Structure formats: C-alpha cells, structure tokens
Amino acid sequence: MSTIKITVTRYNPETSSEPFTQSYTIPYKEDMVVLDALNYIKNHVDGTLTHRWSCRMGVCGSCGMMINGDAKLSCATFLRDYYPGEVQVDPLAHFPVIRDLVIDMSDFMDKLVEIKPWIIRSEEKPLEEGEYLQSPDELDLYRQFSMCINCMLCYSACPVYGHDKSFLGPAAIALAHRYNMDSRDEGQDQRAEIIGSHEGIWECTFVGECTRVCPKHVDPAAAIQRTKVQLTKEYFISWIWPWGNR
Amino acid sequence: MTEEMSHDILIVGGGAAGLRAAIAAAEVDANIDIAVVSKVFPMRSHTVSAEGGAAAVLREEDSLELHGFDTVRGSDFLADQDVVETFIEKAPEELIQLEHWGCPWSRDPDGRISVRAFGGMSVKRTVYASDKTGFHMLHALFQTSLKYTQIRRYDEWFVSSLLIEDGKCVGVTALDLETGQLHPIVAKAILLCTGGGGQIFPFTTNASIKSGDGMALAYRAGAALKDMEFVQYHPTGLPGTGILITEASRGEGGHLINKEGERFLERYIPGKMEMGPRDILSRAIMTEMNEGRAFEGEYGGYVHLDLRHLGEKIIDEKLPFVRELVVKYVGIDPVHEPIPVRPVVHYMMGGVSTDINGNTSIPGLLAAGEVACITLNGANRLGSNSLTECLVFGALSGRAGAQYAVDQKPVSQNAVRSLADKEQKRIAKHFLEKEGGTERVASLQEEMHLTMEQGCGVYRTGESLQESCTTLKKLRERFADVAIDDRGRIFNTDLRGALELEFMLEVAECIAHSALAREESRGAQSRLDFPERSDEKFLHHLLAYATPEGPRFEQQPVTITRWPPEERKY
Ligand SMILES: Cc1cc2nc3c(=O)[nH]c(=O)nc-3n(C[C@H](O)[C@H](O)[C@H](O)COP(=O)(O)OP(=O)(O)OC[C@H]3O[C@@H](n4cnc5c(N)ncnc54)[C@H](O)[C@@H]3O)c2cc1C
Ligand code: SF4
Ligand code: FES
C-alpha cells in the first residue's frame, strides 16, 4: 500500500504556548484530497486534530489552509499533486489561530458589515410590481464579484493585510464593488466613503496575489483597482465641483 | 460572555430557512430581539451547496394549479394540500423578494428572471442563479440580514439540548466552540432551522454538518417526528464522494445511459424520460445495476450522465459548476466524456412535525426548512421545491414565532440554570471526563452507514428493515461506551462529532422503524414485500414519539383539498 507523509502545524493554547509540528504517515490513494487526509488522521489516528470543513465541494469556504506554503482549499487540493513528496499543512497566514488549523476570522466578519453588503436604494419597489429588470449584460458587470465564498485565502496571500490589519482587504472590497456594480443598487457613495476612510487601499500595489490564490476567480485585484480609480474620480469631482457630488 | 443571553426569538440555524426567518421576525417589529445560533458561520450552511434552482410560478404560461398538482402528484398524494396551496401562492413573492435583496438570478435577454425545467415539474418554473443557486441565495440572505441590528448572531455555537420547562420550550443549551463553554440561551420562542440529516447514510450529497441535529433535539424533547421513512435518493451523485450533479444537467438536456449504450429510462418512464421524478429515476438506475446493465467501478455500480451533445457553450453558460466539479473530482471533462453517476441520499422529506405556521406540539417550539415536516413534500419532494420551501415557511414561522414571543413573559436565565447544569454534567460525564470507554466515533458511524445502506436504501424489505432496527439498537447501546480522544475545551470538534453521532443514531432508528411500520410502497419508500401503494391502509402520516423502547407511532390524516388521490402516472 502506498503511503504519504503529512506534517501539520498544531497549536492548542490550553496545553502549550507555542505551535509545534506533528507528522503522520497515512495510506495514499490517487483520488484523495488534502481534506481526506486530515479526516483520515482525525478519524483513525488522532481525534484531537482540529480543522474546519463542511461541503467538501469547494463552495462553503470553510476549509482554507496553507498547503506547502500556498493558500488553498483543502477539499479542492489533491494529494497526487504532491505525491510522492510530502505535504505540509499550516493554518492560513495572517490570522490569529484558535486551535491547530482553525483561524479566527472575526476581523473579516466585522469588515463585512462595515461595507454594507446589501442593496441600498432610496425607494423600494413594492413586491407586487415584480422584479427589477436586469439584462444579462448588466448581470455580467458584477457576477464575477458575487462569487466570493469568504474562504479568506486572499487575506492570507495579501502582503498589505499582512502588516496592516486595518486594511479592508480583497474580499471585502470585491464585495463592495459587487454591490456598486449592481444595476439595482444606489449605495455607491456610502460605500465609497467607508472604503476611502481606510488607508489600506492606497498601500495596495497590485501584486495581484489575491487574484492568483482565489479559488473562485473573483479577481479581487481588479475590484481594488477599479475602486481606487472610482475613489480618485469621486475625490476629484468633489474637489472641482464640491456641490456636484451627486 | 457575561451579558444575559435572553431573546424574544431564538433561531437555531443560519441556512436559507433560518436567515429568512430572522429577517421576517425583524420586520415584524424593530424592537424584537432575535438570536441566530449556528454551529457554522451562516454562509457555510448547507444551503450553499444547492445548485439547480428554486421553483415558483412567475410566468403567464404557468399556473398555481399546475404547480400545486405537480407537487401533490410528486408527493405520491401524501402532501397536505392546504400546505401546498399556501406554498404555491407565496412562492412567487418570496423569489421576487430575494431578487429585491440582490440575489443574482439568471436573466432572459429582456431582463426578466429566467426559468428552467426540473424533474417532475410539467413546465419550466425553476428560477436559478447559474448552477450555484443555493450559494447565491444564502449569501444574499446572509448579507441582507447584516443590516438588521436587532439580529444577534452566535456563530459556531452548537446547540446540544432544548430547555423545556412546564411543558414549554424556553431556550437551548449551546456549546461555544471557540471557548468550550456551555451556555443556556433563553428565548420566548425557539425556531429550529437545522436542516436535514444525509450524513446518516454513506453515500450522500449532504455536507458533513447535516447530522439531523434538530430532529433529534425535538424528538428527545417529546415532539413528534413525521414521515421519517421517506428519504430521497438523488439519481445523479458522483460515486465515492456523493457530490451532486444537479438535476439541471438533465433539465438542460442531459441523457442517462447504461453499459449497453441504451437510454434505459425508455423502459421505466417513457413519457418523461430524464425529467421524471427522483424516486422513479433512482429506482430505475438501481434496477439497471441489479440486473447487470450498469458499469462497475471502485465504488460499485454506476451509469453515465451524458452532456456531450449539449456542447461546450451551453455547458459553460448553464452548468459551469458541474463542469468545474467533474473536471476536479472525476478528472474528466463532461464536454468530451460522459459523467459516472449513481443514486445518493439527498434529502429527508420527514422531520419535526409542525402545523402550517411551523408550530410543533411543544408550545414555544417551531420548525421550518428541511428539518421540519410541515408536509409539503409527502413521500417524494420535487427538485427545486425545497429552497422555496425554506423561504416561504421560514418567513411564515419567523413571523409566527415573533408574534408568539410578543405575547409571552420574558424568561430569565436563572430559571433554567439547573437544567443547563444538568446538561453540562452530562457532557462532562459521557465525554470530556469519561473514564474508560472503548468505542470510536468513526467506527460506530461506519457501522451505522452500512446498516442504513443495506437495510433502509432505495429498496427495502421487512427483513432488511428489522435487521437495521436491531443493529441500530445495538449501536446506540455501544455508543454509551464511546471514548473521544480530545478532552480539551477549545474548539473541540471531536466532542461535536460525538454529539452529532448521538443525534444521528436516534434519527436513524426512527427512520428504520418508520419504514418498517409503513407496509406499502409510496414515493421514496419502496418495499419489495409490499410493492403497491395502499390508500386504504396508509393514506396517512406516521408520527413517531420517542420512548425508551424505540419509537411509538400515531397516525395523522392527510389533508386533501383540491387534488383527490389517483394513480401516480407520468
Ligand atoms: C448538494 C445539494 C443540492 C441541492 N440543490 C437543491 C436545489 O437545486 N433546489 C432545491 O430546492 N433544493 C436543493 N437542495 C436541498 C436544499 O438545499 C436544502 O433542503 C435546504 O438548503 C435546506 O436549508 P435549511 O435552511 O433547512 O438548512 P441548512 O442550509 O442545512 O442549514 C442548517 C443550519 O442549521 C445549523 N445547525 C444545524 N445543527 C445545529 C446545531 N446542533 N446547533 C447549531 N446550529 C445547527 C447549521 O449550522 C446551519 O446553519 C439541495 C441539497 C443538496 C445537498
Ligand atoms: S475573493 Fe476569492 S480568495 Fe478571497 S475570500 Fe473570496 S473566494 Fe476566497
Ligand atoms: S469543505 Fe467547503 S470549501 Fe472545502
């Protein structure tokens, strides 16, 4: 039977103040993903190993971790891409660790509320009047940015977030952009104010790491880029025509 | 957490049903204090995996009457028709509401919401957001819920028991996973929206969190579970992982083919072919397997789902997620090769018995969504009715719960302190501080899977069911001897897994006994020893109540309004 060696960085604040690593050699099959390996360890070898997962099909966003140094979804990363080499698993970078591979994402949850990710309108159409019409082209303007599964891989890859936790970060800005681009929404100014009030966005130098690691092709780098342009434009407009900013 | 955890309405679950309920409650009155307790962050809830779509009558060429009849016929005449009528009437406005909340529904060129075909629906009426419908619905609901400041969330809190005082439900005990503390949270009304329990079976489309928790919680507290024998198999899951290949792939024109290269449905349901209902298609595939006309692979028999004739453009436009999943998890491209599929457990028609507003038999306790059996789905759910069900009845019961709460006196946390202490001691004694114990959670779970697949699968007999009942009883006894590895407090998923298995074993037992008690074949229940539907003997619901000896059954008549039972023909 073929086997593979998995090394996991572990941490349990109840028993040790420092993280430590632990290696497990487990049976290997072609169709196994890294998550299967972790579950094998949890079920058969060491029930204290702690990680999050749920859908095992790349859509719930729970199972992000560093796999051989790269931020990835463990349910969508195959062991065969590393075999016969070893696999090293660490918690997502740039986040406080609660235990083993479980990170604390409360910072993102707060930022999510901050950017007002809901449809903002001055007037609501009554339900009896039916849907807001939206053409497929209008849908295409924001569709890509609505694909975010909140997996946090982009935060792990983002050098700005790495040193400045006040940065709203790729996924939050992409989501704000998603609503801004939605033909049903009128909240762009409110969101621009919020995003503009955070310094971080000006530090982003478009390394594009967020877009590279994003498993859902959201392209947060493009969203940040366009948001910046929009912010400068708004700033510019309010400067020349202080009365004219919509 | 030092503040008093006391609310007007407490919703367990942050999936489509729970979030829709929370928003509905918030809109009853801005002063209503709402809690949403969920064992995962709401956007991780299983609703996220739903692919195909949500049904409602939005087009002139469709009619409520037809949606109603399709649903009742699909249910093999076991749906309560007053519930069906409410459902079809409210469905359109709920989907429009979601559109107003930003859900990116797929659109026609004229800007209207598009509709697609779905199995068992006689016209195109399934609204969709590409093939990530559940994902988009869940995120739209979650993001919209964030604007209501009176909704307080308890993310990653696991509800371990319901607090019942003087026959009323007054709260829950919940384990804060991050700290490992068990807290009582009290409320005037408790609404269960905990979803289904596909993890009771080995091959399932369901996520790991779908362990029937809410069903077991209510059952233990004395509420009835209804129609638990009806477990839906989806005809097209991937062998091995059970990952779902959405019905929309057949709706868009995909074909099912056996080893002989035949479109074998010709033999079973020529009138509908691939667009037939799930129970009939699943049985057809199983029969092909049993009669040697299926392919054989590492994970047993399978047939082919062929999309090649649709072409790359349609596949990418309408079914991009299917392509993504198949390329990733099967290693083939459905544009060029057929997809191996087999029937896998998908949905539970049964659940906590409720009336049309979501009330259970315990005052103060309501249920909605997949966990509930309000009886919309009867013996077989039609695909794309359940997301809509979560919206329609999530909203109704959220409102009902909030209104009920307004009239109740506040509950104080002190009143339930002793109940909570008891629960704390139970968890310590059986798990965290247990001495001895030789059973592993994972092995008991595997044995449960085996007996459920063998005894309570697509085809059942009195004998196979009896055997499952016996095995499950033994497994429950052995569970008393379970020892978990992890004795820590912080984020103890080993403990969570043990508590979930305990829930699953109870629900599994209820499924097996219910299936044994129903000596007929109807919808998803196919008894080889009773192959016919028997309206004389079984045109009623089975209510199961927990007793130390196993479930005790009562009958409840089916409500029939417009559609008298007839032979189910397609
Ligand atoms: C792969 C797949 C595809 C599907 N596709 C479709 C489709 O196209 N159309 C359709 O109509 N239906 C579809 N369904 C069915 C539909 O998705 C589900 O029935 C529906 O989403 C259930 O929603 P829910 O809100 O009831 O529960 P869920 O979304 O499962 O949410 C349950 C919630 O309860 C919480 N919870 C559970 N137990 C506890 C506990 N002990 N303590 C605290 N919280 C708890 C969870 O954290 C979660 O937030 C599909 C199902 C699957 C599996
Ligand atoms: S933008 Fe991409 S990488 Fe970032 S959280 Fe969303 S899905 Fe994950
Ligand atoms: S388990 Fe859901 S994304 Fe990996």
Image (spheres, coloured by chain):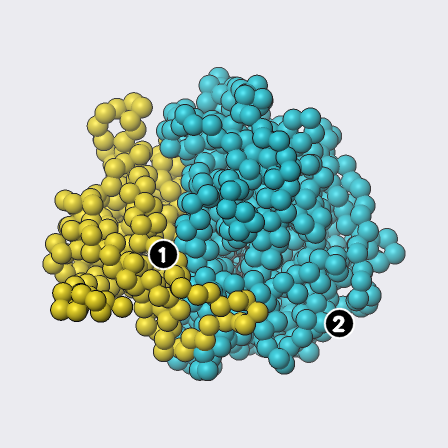
Chain colours: A yellow, B cyan
Element marked by disc 1: loop
Q: Label 2 is placed on what type of residue?
A: Lys
Q: Horizontal placement of B266 versus B258: left or right?
A: right
Q: How far apart are marks 2 and 1 (CA)?
A: 47 Å
Q: Name the residue under label 1.
A: A117
Q: Which chain carries label 2?
A: B
Which residue is depicted at the point 46% across and 19% down?
A: B433
Q: Which chain carries label 1?
A: A
- The residue sitting at the right extreme is B536
Residue B168 visible: yes
Measured along the vertical axis of the image, is residue A186 above or below residue A23? below
Q: Mark 2 points at which residue?
A: B569
Helix, strand or loop at disc 2?
A: loop
**Quarter that holds the C terminus of chain B:** bottom right
Q: Which residue is at a point 71% across and 48% down the rendered structure image?
A: B355
Residue A25 position in % (x across, y down): 30, 39
Front position among marks 2 and 1: 1
> Image quadrant of residue B551?
top right
Disc 1 crowd rating (10 Å Cα; few below 14, some 14-19, many 20+) is: many
Residue A151 rendering spot, x and y as whole percentages: 32, 51
Up-down relation of residue B22 to residue B447 (above or below) = below
Which of B204/B27 is in front?
A: B27
Quarter of the view holding residue B272: bottom right
In-front residue for pair A164/B462? A164
Q: Is residue B133 visible?
A: no
Q: In the image, what residue occupies the spot 63% across and 81% down?
A: B61
Left of A137 or right of it: where is B518?
Answer: right
The disc labelled 1 sits on which kind of residue?
Pro
Of B19 and B280, the residue lying toward us: B19
Q: Residue furthest top?
A: B435
Nearer the observer, B6 or B124: B6
Residue extending furthest toward the front: A243
